[in-house]
Amino acid sequence: MMKINLNKKIRKKRRVSTRIKGNDKRPRISVFRSNRYIYAQAIDDEKQTTLLSFSSQKLAKSNKVGQAKEVGLQLAKILKEKKIDEVVFDRNIYIYKGRVKALAEGLREGGIKV
């Protein structure tokens, strides 16, 4: 049972992520969502390096959607400091709703073109 579920997730990730590539001018924002926290990192796929990351572990406790939006805003602030205005959003295996959508909206509110 577990093997089937894992294979399903891997297929979904490949379907979503294979067409998405980032570089140093337009990095890929990869999202990971756990039951408690949400993590986002900016990745340069050409050099295969992580430029920066931010997670809700560093924030004060609030509701999960609010935390996700705050992660997006903080990530946008850091990206602006590094003079990055445009990103590619990689939602991984997650559906674009709830916390994932709130993170993307936080990036947009911070002035980043997604």
Image (tube, rainbow, N blue to C red):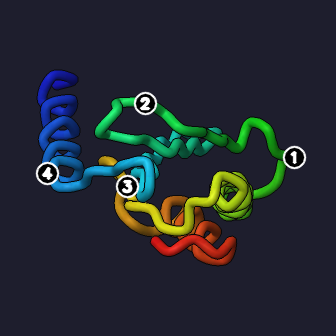
Q: Is residue 37 above or below residue 74?
A: above
Q: Residue at x 12, y 29 (%)?
A: 4
Question: At label 4, which amino acid type do we have?
Answer: Arg
Sequence-first disc among 2 and 3? 2
Tag 1 and tag 4, C-beta contact below 8 Å: no
Q: Which mark is residue 15?
A: 4
Q: Residues within 10 Å of mark 1 (few under 14, many from 20)?
A: few
Question: At label 2, which amino acid type do we have?
Answer: Thr
Residue 21 coordinates in the image, percent (x, y): 26, 51
Sequence-first disc among 3 and 1? 1
What residue is shown with label 1? 60
Query: Which corner quadrant holds the C terminus?
Result: bottom left
Residue 113 coordinates in the image, percent (x, y): 50, 74
Q: Find the distance from the CA under tag 2 to the CA under tag 4.
A: 22 Å
37 or 106, which is in the foreground?
106
What residue is shown with label 3? 91
Q: Residues within 10 Å of mark 4 (few under 14, many from 20)?
A: few
Question: At label 1, which amino acid type do we have?
Answer: Ala
Q: Is residue 33 above or below residue 10?
A: below
Query: Which corner quadrant holds the N terminus?
Result: top left
Element marked by disc 2: strand
Q: Is residue 24 above or below residue 34?
A: below
Q: Residue at x 58, y 75 (%)?
A: 108
Element marked by disc 4: helix
Q: Find the distance from the CA under tag 2 to the CA under tag 3.
A: 18 Å
Q: Find the distance from the CA under tag 3 to the CA under tag 4.
A: 11 Å
Element marked by disc 1: loop
Sequence-first disc among 3 and 4? 4
Tag 3 and tag 1, C-beta contact below 8 Å: no
Tag 2 and tag 3, C-beta contact below 8 Å: no
